Image (cartoon, rainbow, N blue to C red):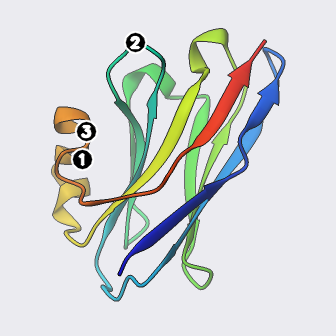
Amino acid sequence: HVQLVESGGGSVQAGGSLRLSCERSGFVYTGYCMAWFRQAPGKEREGVAAIDSDGSVSYADSVKGRFAISQDVAKRTIFLQINNLKLADAAMYYCAASSVKHDCVSGSWRYDGGAYLGDWGQGTQVTVS
């Protein structure tokens, strides 16, 4: 049973920074694709960043230069560093995972709001004022 637990959200002033974490358990695959998504009220879920088991990363164009995804393989944790927060960044942020590394390589992790990724966390709220 795969479990993803996000943390690190909070209320931050515009221009500030946050670091979100997502710890996974019950995930036995050595190859994987993990990603961060966000969803604001009334908007569709949007993929923002992904990282695969080899450490290759990809980003949505809207967050390039301000968001950074990374991982600690030993701790089974991925991170999302968000810098220079904007009002538009306010959303619930979700962590998602797939046992198919190619979901990252191909870019399909972003399709249909993350439909290719089968495991999801409960989310962590980011509020920007």
Q: Nearer the viewer, mark 2 or mark 3?
A: 2
How far is mark 2 from mark 1, CA to CA?
A: 22 Å
In this orientation, which residue lies closer to the viewer: 47 or 61?
Answer: 47
Looking at the image, do the residues carrying marks 2 and 3 touch, with CB atoms under 8 Å apart? Answer: no
* 34 horizontally vs 40: left or right: left
Tags 3 and 1 touching, CB below 8 Å: yes
Q: Quadrant of residue 46?
A: top left
Name the residue type under label 2: Gly
Circle 3 sits on which residue? 110
Q: Residues within 10 Å of mark 2 (few under 14, many from 20)?
A: few
Image coordinates of residue 7 in percent, x first then y, are 68, 54
Q: Is residue 75 left or right of residue 19?
A: left
- Mark 2 vs mark 1, foreground winner is 2
Cα distance, mark 2 to mark 3? 19 Å
Q: Residue 64 at x, y = what percent?
A: 49, 28
In the rendered image of this protein, does residue 109 appear above or below residue 37?
below
In the picture provided, is 11 more to the left or to the right than 30? right
N-terminal label among 2 and 3: 2
In the rendered structure, are the residues bearing label 2 and label 1 in contact, judged by CB atoms less than 8 Å apart? Answer: no
The numbered mark, 2 or 1, whose residue comes first in the sequence reads 2
Task: Determine which residue is flagged by label 2.
Answer: 42
Label 3 neighbour load within 10 Å: few <14, some 14-19, many 20+:
many
Residue 109's disc number: 1
Vertical order, 115 against 12 (above or below): below
